[in-house]
Amino acid sequence: MATLQRPKVVKRLSWQDMSPASPRIHLTRRIVQLQGNKASAKILEQAKQICNDYVEAKLDRDGIKNRSLSFACSNSQEEASQVSSRVQEVGELLELCYPRLYSDISSRVNVPFSSENVVHEVFNNVSSEILSDGLNWARIVALYAFAGALVAECCKEGRNSFVLDIGNWMYEFAALYMVDWIKSKGGWVRRITLS
């Protein structure tokens, strides 16, 4: 006999969430707008895929790969895999050169990782800080290195479920802050894969 499970608690939307000035409404409109443009939509999907690939590689490097963790993969294109490899290579160098920046994140930001919302907020706040002086490829790679370090720390603390949506968080962040810049540079492949 099947047992009944309590439904997951879902946050109810307030009138504030529905106002045109709401950050969620702004993000949704932005994503819909970008998905209408083939080049922008491709950049966003690649941003998500690169993030998932980076996190998988980071967990493998740290020896904390776990079968219960499964990151969503889109139809991986050859272009995205070339960029992923390059981002992983440069990101690993950043981690080796600046190990303090990519470890013990919760104590550095002085916030315990107590819920998925807290981890998501830390991701958004630190990512915004990384890009606060403007965009360049090094800062974008640093953002992926940070995402990998954040996931690794959560996994080490046994909070795997907090970060299963990291690719979606990167997708949203890229929609708000990165897609136009990457598009102006000719996309991911044109620049990142150059040696």
Image (spheres, grey):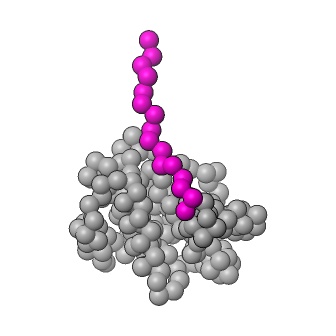
Q: Quadrant of residue 27?
A: bottom right
Look at the image and give the residue range highlighted in magenta: 1-16
Horizontal side of residue 174 vs 65, given as left or right: right
Give the percent coordinates (x, y) of residue 148.
39, 62
Is residue 6 highlighted in magenta?
A: yes
Q: Is residue 60 visible?
A: no
Q: What residue is shown at x 44% (from left), y 41% (from top)? A: 9
Judged from this view, the residue extending furthest toward the bottom is 133
Q: Quadrant of the N terminus?
A: top left
Is residue 147 highlighted in magenta?
A: no
Horizontal side of residue 110 vs 189, given as left or right: left
Q: Quadrant of the C terminus?
A: bottom right
Q: What residue is shown at x 62% (from left), y 77% (from top)? A: 182
Q: What residue is shown at x 45% (from left), y 16% (from top)? A: 2
| Up/down of 11 relative to 48, above or below | above
Residue nearer the viewer, 161 or 3: 3
Horizontal side of residue 9 vs 83, given as left or right: left
Give the percent coordinates (x, y) of residue 99.
27, 73
Residue nearer the viewer, 152 or 29: 29
| Up/down of 139 relative to 50, above or below | below
Give the percent coordinates (x, y) of residue 7.
46, 34
Q: Is residue 159 visible?
A: yes
Q: Main secondary structure of the magenta part?
A: loop
